[in-house]
Amino acid sequence: MASDLLSRRRFLTGTGGLAGGLLVLAPAGVAAQEAVFMRAEDAPAALFPDASAVADRRVVATAELRTRIRALLSRPPSLWEAEYRIFTVTRGEHDAGFVVIVEEIGKHRPISFAVAVDGRGHVSDIAVLAYREAYGGEVRERRFLKQYAGKTLSDPLRPYRDVRNISGATLSVEATGRAARKAIAVLKATGDLT
Amino acid sequence: MARRRFLAVVLIVLLSVPGLGARGLVLAATPEELEARLKALQDQVDTLRRQLEETRAQRAAPPAPTAPAAAASAQPAVAAPVSATERPFGLTDFKIGGYGSTRFEASDLSNLNNTFTFRRFVLSGDATIAGRLRSVVELEFERLTELEVERGAPSEDGRRGFSQSIEGSDKSELSLEQAWAEFAFAEWARFRAGMMLVPLGRFNLNHDDNRWDLPRRSLVDRGVPALPVPAAWSEVGMGLVGDIPTDDWGKFTYQVLVMNGVTLDSSIETFARGSGELEAEVEIQPRRGTANIDLKRDKAGALRLTWSPEPASEIGASVYYGRYTPDVLPSESVWAIGLDGKTMLGPIEIEGQYVLTHYNGIRRVARGFADAVANREFTAGTPLEVAVEFELAGLAETKHGYWADLRYRFFPDFLRDTPLGRPFDNPQFVLTLRGEQVWLNGLVKEIDFSNGLLTSIERENRWVDRVTLGLAYRPVPLFVIQAAVERTWTNQGKSLAAVTNFLPARRTEDTANTFLLGVAFGF
């Protein structure tokens, strides 16, 4: 009978004990939907773990630069940043690649990305620095982001075409693709990539 | 005296303010002193200008490389947040969203007119209250276009009367679908309390109309509900939800909730017959539990586990168990299980769900029901004949069924430079084939009782099948135009109206062919 399974006493004892246990065991970090997950200055070391040196610079997004970026993209980005923070990463004597900080709108808010690009213009890795939407935060998961490795500006990077979609996070998946393409376009427009 | 003190205090305060004191000095300074001060200020401005130019020059040219900071994590994208409470500007904002849907429907059923239906408009809000605290609310207006309540005390021929009237639209509903708050102990353990969607099957949790490519909800979830309560089914309760990502085994999630749970509850429908009879029909059927004091002593529980081996795939298993009878009836339980999943095979997306619900002790419930409403059917006299009937509805010993969708997404290149493609980043057509079957075993058809005793209970086994072929145009993920043809049929010679809640078929109409054209949007 149902009354045997979930009597009031059992319910109160169970939930009380569980809640108490969680309060004791609760760890420090909570990766909720909305949060700042990484600082921009930490991104180069995270995306290029074997980097030996990093040069940090900011490039103002002038009208001329935006025009060049727009020409490289098939469509305009969902937002224009005031400036682009570009990290040039060195491994030993050689350039390992770049990390570009870009933002793209998910549904309502910008998502901040750090996009790692190698010297040939291929995406090598992506990290979500800050996620500000109520839903769709699964795009920061490693197993999703790793599918962008090797993609170039000529790839569409769109769900159901060359990117595996996440149910309920389609807008954020599209934003991730736009961010990756924008990062490569920024490097080409600034002359860092040919 | 007081005034003098006040003026003295004001004077002291004014004199003690450095700026005002300095201004007094300046006014008293000589031209030489003023010139010296101007020169000092000019020197400061020159220094600041040089610093500004140096900063600009540093930004324009790459600085000398520096050693990178220690790697934050071998897997940066799943790193814990920098701070649980440190959030970017604007994150405390309340985000408002919602969805809505409208449908045109043309059927070959003789009692069903071709019609436009405003399916629903749902307003939702999401707030991050603080680092670990979140709240979600969802308010549904289903076919609701008007609700007007009037009360008055009119006077006629010097006599005071009282009036009350309710004006509303047909088959309308105003429903609080979700209103819960969450405290995240950890990503894998988030305490949630309030009005929450019951985690039984994937559709109930993902029921937003703009997410789907067909303009009608599935049979097991809505039209011939094998769920204990049709979707969207929410209950008041508390529980834990959590996500557990792993390196090698994908991602696991769980939800475990305790709630008031589904209860046999009443609804009263009033009919004013053309014969001058006013009839009230009290329908007792499983409904979502009350948000007030529970009608039964025991609570219900639900558990859902999912495994997502890769981002586009998920397998889920759910179970629900609880008492469904109010305290005035014998204590009997209902249990339900759900199995569901979604995956992609090349360009084909496959999604489906199976649900089985079993009600224990229906005969005992019918006997208790007969006892509870004994001799309650009565008629009253002039000016209107009033009849009250009690009906036990929607109960079957076992209800089970499934839906399975095959979807193919495409967009022809020759349409990319047309208004269907040009303005959008990733427009899609979605071809969908859905197959559905529902079985109702031991469906209570009619019960008779006399003097508080159950005299007979008539039950039958029924099934309903439906096949739907749809084509949707989705210019952006939040907007979809859905066209579909569907064929619904049941046991030969038996009416679809007795087993569905949306097809007003005649007594022998066992098949319905319908064309649907819908629009759904989200924001």
Image (cartoon, coloured by chain):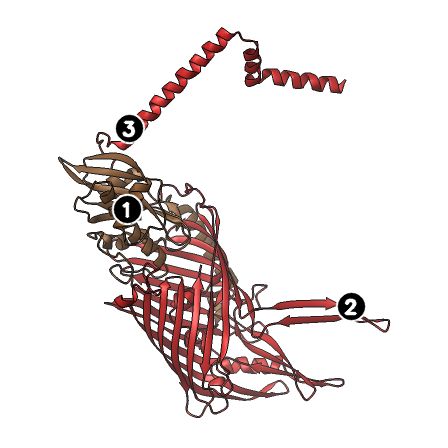
Chain colours: A brown, B red
Vertical relation: B492 (above or below) A110: below
Residue lying at 55% horizontally and 81% vertically, measured from the top left: B392
In this image, B8 relative to A165: left or right? right
Callout 1 amino acid: Ile
Which chain is home to disc 1?
A
- Residue A8, image x, y percentages: 52, 62
Q: Which SS class for mark 1?
A: helix
The residue that appears at 38% across and 22% down in the rendered structure is B48
- Horizontally, is B288 left or right of B316 in the view? right
Front tag of 2 and 3: 3
Read off the chain for label 2: B
In x, y percent, where is residue B306? 34, 63
**In the image, what residue occupies the spot 46% across and 12% down?**
B37
Question: How far, Cα to Cα, is label 2 from label 1?
Answer: 71 Å
Q: Residues within 10 Å of mark 2 (few under 14, many from 20)?
A: few
Which residue is farthest right?
B158
Nearer the observer: mark 2 or 1; the answer is 1
Do the residues at discs 2 and 3 belong to one chain? Answer: yes
Q: Quadrant of the N terminus of chain B?
A: top right
Q: Quadrant of the C terminus of chain B?
A: bottom left
Q: Quadrant of residue B251?
A: bottom left
Which residue does the numbered mark 2 point to in the structure image? B153
Can residue B71 be seen?
no
**Label 2 element class:** loop
In the foreground, B301 or A117 = A117
Identify residue type, mark 2: Ala
| CA distance for labels 2 and 3 | 81 Å
Q: Is residue B252 visible?
A: yes
**Label placed on residue B57:** 3
Q: Which residue position holds label 1?
A: A69
